[in-house]
Amino acid sequence: MTTTRFAPSPTGRLHVGNIRTALHNWMLAEKAGGTFVLRIDDTDAARSREEYVEAIREDLAWLGLAPAREERQSHRLEAYQAAFDRLRDAGRIYPAYETSQELELKRKIQLGRGLPPIYDRAALKLGDDERAAKEAEGIAPHWRFRLDHDEAIAWDDGVRGKQSFDAAQLSDPVIRRADGSWLYMLPSTVDDIDMGVTQVLRGEDHVSNTAVQIQMFTALGAAPPAFAHEALLVGKEGKLSKRLGSLGCDAFRERGIEPEALVALLARLGTSLPVEPIADRAKLLETFDLSTFGRAPAKFDDAELERINTAIVHAMEFAQAQDRLPDGMDEAGWHAMRPNVATVAEAEQWWKLVTGPIAQPNFAAEDRTFLGHAAETLEWGEDPWRALTSTLKQVTGRKGKALFLPLRQALTGMDHGPDMGELLPLIGEDEARSRLKRAAAA
Ligand code: GLU
């Protein structure tokens, strides 16, 4: 049974990068008929905020990525403590006393000598008496996980293929601060075990964390899940810009971007599949496959999102748009306006052509006569626009622009807009006649 998780830290709103990770985890689970879990990584009490937890839930709901359940790291501290005790008893966790300045100095010296800045395990080499002396000085230790340098680290990454790491080339990670608070590494592993996570899909910035965590899984007696690391998302200009980091669901929603547009784009961006305006998730799921994911950074282009959004809005059913349409706008109204809008919200301004009032231009005398004629000719049947224009064409000899434009201007006040054949029935017979008369009289 496949279980995936999306594990945001509630220290800010979701941005387009983590929306993508959430989507892919949802898709992995959905495609396999498995479970998608939302895990709130809120061990950092100082930076985590409840309002962001709320916002994350709302964003996922808006995107249609409903988790089967929600977990919270701050509710699981006992489980982390138990794992910590086990690993410490097994000699896999050790106390360290260096200050951050000391560590920084060590790093600088190593780098100055052209060496990789790997933690030198000085704390591991302390004798009992030296440790006791530190404690007597009142220095509380932070804690490191001791990597097993003899244990090979390898996995078959769902995106990157075969990966291997030499544990000796990695620093023993700090897993707990001196004040007892947790860093990301161990709680995440404990959760993945306890929550039965079978697939971890996350950004490639986590690749070296995976190397460390694989040893944690083993040390805790659990088989590691399958791992996959997707290439990062970058802006069109090739960098992970600040702007990209600030693009959240709220900003997209305000701009009239549909969740389905975001989903269609992010489902395939950075894969070998074409990005298309596919609003049907089942279709996206059918083709979703980690083996199509590329290694190069995925480029997020706002203009591409807008194109997809427009195409999705143009094909959107009335029922889906209904809640956001102006009062009185029915299915025929939506169908008439739909091809003219880039967002659902724009339908409102076009709907004013129906409800009025409209501002007509000043017509030349000849056009006024023509429009007066039109007011008399107007007959209400199956297709009043067609009937009106074909009669006027015969009677006046006008055609093309000379025939259509004054009518459109008189009826809508505009030179362009929705199809008149669809619009005229919405305006209605009396209103249409009075607009034509008014134009003729002006
Ligand atoms: N909270 C971590 C992050 O946001 C989760 C990483 C993971 O998926 O394991 O980076």
Image (cartoon, grey):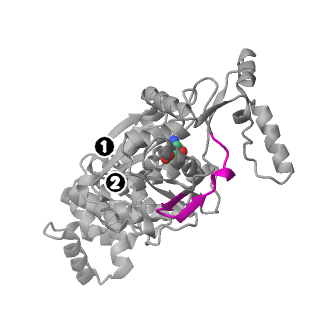
**Type of residue at label 1?**
Ala
Q: Nearer the viewer, residue 380 or 5?
A: 5
Residue that numbered label 1 is attached to: 68
Residue that numbered label 2 is attached to: 29
Residue 243 placement (x, y as % from top left)? 60, 50
| Horizontal arrangement in the rendering, residue 226 relative to residue 152 (left or right) | left
C-alpha span from label 1 to label 2: 10 Å
User: Circles 1 and 2: CB distance less than 8 Å?
Assistant: yes
Q: Residue at x 47, y 61 (%)?
A: 305
Location of residue 86 with respect to 284 vertically, above or below: above
Q: Is residue 160 magenta?
A: yes
Residue 53 placement (x, y as % from top left)? 44, 34
Question: In terms of sequence position, does the residue under pointer 1 or pointer 2 come before the other?
Answer: 2
Q: Secondary structure at mark 1?
A: loop
Q: Is residue 420 visible?
A: yes
| Horizontal arrangement in the rendering, residue 386 relative to residue 95 (left or right) | left
Q: Residue at x 46, y 46 (%)?
A: 249
**Type of residue at label 2?**
Ala
Which quadrant: the C terminus? Answer: bottom left
Q: Is residue 344 visible?
A: no
Residue 142 placement (x, y as % from top left)? 65, 29
Q: Residue at x 44, y 68 (%)?
A: 291
Q: Residue at x 37, y 78 (%)?
A: 402
Q: Quarter-wise, where is residue 231 in the image?
A: bottom right
Q: Residues within 10 Å of mark 1 (few under 14, many from 20)?
A: few
Residue bounds of the magenta highlight: 154-173
